[in-house]
Amino acid sequence: MYIKRAILMVGFLTRIPIPFEIDGTEEDYGKGLVFAPVVGLMIGGIITALFYILKRFFPQGITSILLIAAYIILTGGLHLDGLGDTFDGIFSNRSRERILEIMRDSRIGTNALLAVVCVIILDYALLSSISVSYLPRALLLFPAAGRIGSLIGAGISVYAREGEGLGKSFIDCCGVKEILQGSIIYFLLSLLVLGTKGLLLAALTVMTAFFTVRFFSKKVGGATGDILGAVCELNQTFFLILFYLVK
């Protein structure tokens, strides 16, 4: 059961091909979010390996751009799409119902464009500024920091929409138990990679995830799949900022 849910998370949260088909229930997807930090570490591991190859040929600035591009390819831009939709809706200054309609609209608005561009530029600036000797550890952990944000967002929220939606199974079936289990995994990973500083960063990014989710949820009375994606991307950036400050 646990292996099945872990594989489902790899298939959903990344574009890494799974060579066989697995049927998962809504409960499998929701409770499978426990493994989101592990999937994040997997993404971080691939990006870190790529960093060691690219740094032989390019300066840090170009390498950082290529690593961000690789991250987008690995994830299919799933969470960046959620970030854009969330900012289009939340900052439209409309009613709750209209905000949710805007978030479901596939067209890109000004707020979406600004949010995605600013996050990518900030991630690039941070990756370019972190010392090369510390950068592999940041690369390894920042996707895990993002995905603990999605786990916390799903576990503390109710579904904001009526009817079905991409995030409904995650939000309905993920709870405090999954948050605790996933957080233990995340803290252990952080400790192994960064030592005691890792525990500090893990604690701070759990807090940033909680407050970010609360901020968005107040606007629409809950969370959606887009909001979970937005929290993931923002939490990754928060992690890189904190890493830069305490490295």
Image (cartoon, rainbow, N blue to C red):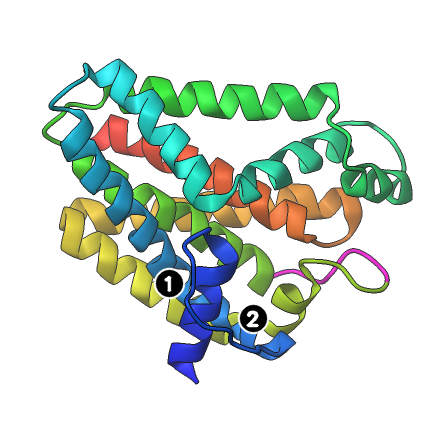
Residue with the mark numbered 1: 183
Residue at 60%, 24% (x, y): give it: 115
Residue 81 drawn at (x, y percent): 62, 38
Q: Is residue 38 magenta?
A: no
Q: Is 199 in front, or is 41? A: 41
Q: Is residue 89 visible?
A: yes
Q: CA distance from mark 1 to mark 2?
A: 17 Å
Say whether residue 220 is left or right of residue 14: right
For the point 52% across and 53% down, the residue is 150
144 lies above or below 129: below
Report whether 78 appears left or right of 45: right
Q: State yes or no: discs 1 and 2 in contact (Cβ < 8 Å).
A: no
User: Could you tell whether 54 is left or right of 118 in the image?
Assistant: left
- Quarter of the rendering occupied by the C terminus: top left
Q: Which residue is mark 2?
A: 29
**Mark 1 or mark 2: whose residue is earlier in sequence:** 2
